[in-house]
Image (spheres, helix red, strand yellow):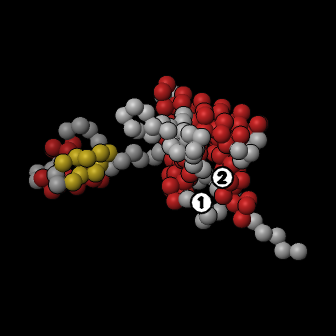
Amino acid sequence: MQDNEYFTKSSTKKEFINLLERDGFIVDEGKIITQIQKDIPINESYPFKISLEPVPELIRDLLIEIGSAYSHQLQLLCGIGVRMLLEAVCNDQGLKYQYDENNQVKTNRQGRPITNNLHTMIDKLNQLGIITNKQKEILLEIKELGNQTAHEIKRHESDLIRQMLEVVEHIIFQIYHLEKLKFKP
C-alpha cells in the first residue's frame, strides 16, 4: 500500500479505519493504538516437560509467558523472563529477605526489609541443599545472561534461551515435584 492510499481510497472516517485495520493496525475510538506485526516467524512452542499444576501461580504464569515469548522468538523478553523466573523461585523459597539470629526480617534505618540479591539467593539454595554446587554455578551463569539482557540489551540465541529454560525447568521440577512423587511398591 502506498502512503497516500489511505487518503485517496477512503472518503469517510469509517473507510479510513477499515483500511488501517486491514493492514494490521489496531484502532480504538478512531485513534491508532499499535500496528500488529504480520509474518513474525514462530518457533515451535516451548515444550514444557513438567506439569505446571503443583507450581505456585506466579511461577506458572511466568513459565507460560516465557513459553509464549519463546514461540514468537522474543529472545529479549525470554532472557529477562528466565532471570525473573529464577528470582520468583528463590522468593517462593523464602530467600528474598535477610534474617537475624531470631529469624526476624532485618530492616534498614528507614524500617524497610533488607532484601538479598539474586546471587545471594542462589547461594542460599545451595547452602540449604536444594541445589548442587554444579547447579549453583549454572544458575549463576543464567542470572548473568539475564542481567546482560536487562542491562546491556543483549539478545541471546534461541538455542541458548532453550537451554536456560531447560535448566530452570529442571530446578522447578526438583523443588515442586520431586518431593511429591510417590512410588507404589
- Residue 3 seen in the figure: yes
| First-in-chain label (1 vs 2) | 1
In front here: 117 or 38? 117
Rendered residue at 71%/47% (across/down): 130
Task: Name the side, left or right, on which 106 lies relative to 21.
Answer: right
Q: Which residue is rendered at x = 73% and y = 61% of the image?
A: 179
Q: Amino acid at mark 2?
A: Ile
- Identity, as a three-letter code, of the amino acid under mark 1: Val
Q: Position of residue 42 (x, y in %)?
A: 54, 48
Q: Position of residue 3 (x, y in %)?
A: 23, 37
- Residue beneath label 2, please? 172
Position of the N terminus by quadrant? top left
Left or right: 12, with 3 as reference point:
left
- Of all residues shown, which one is farthest toward the bottom? 185
57 vs 7, left or right, is right
The image quarter in which residue 79 lies: top right
Residue at the location (71% across, 53% down)? 174
In this view, the residue farthest toward the right is: 185
Q: Secondary structure at mark 2?
A: helix
Residue sitting nearer the eye, 41 or 70: 70
Specify the quadrant that holds the C terminus: bottom right
Relative to 55, say whether 19 is above or below. Answer: above
How far across and how far down the image is residue 13, in percent?
A: 12, 52
Check whether the beta carbons of the residues at disc 1 and disc 2 lie within 8 A of each other: yes
Q: Residues within 10 Å of mark 1 (few under 14, many from 20)?
A: some
Q: Dot 1 lies on which element?
A: loop
Q: Which residue is mark 1?
A: 55
Within 10 Å of disc 2 (Cα), the crowding (few <14, some 14-19, many 20+) is: some
Q: Nearer the viewer, residue 106 or 64?
A: 106
User: Is 78 left, or right, of 140 in this rendering?
Assistant: left
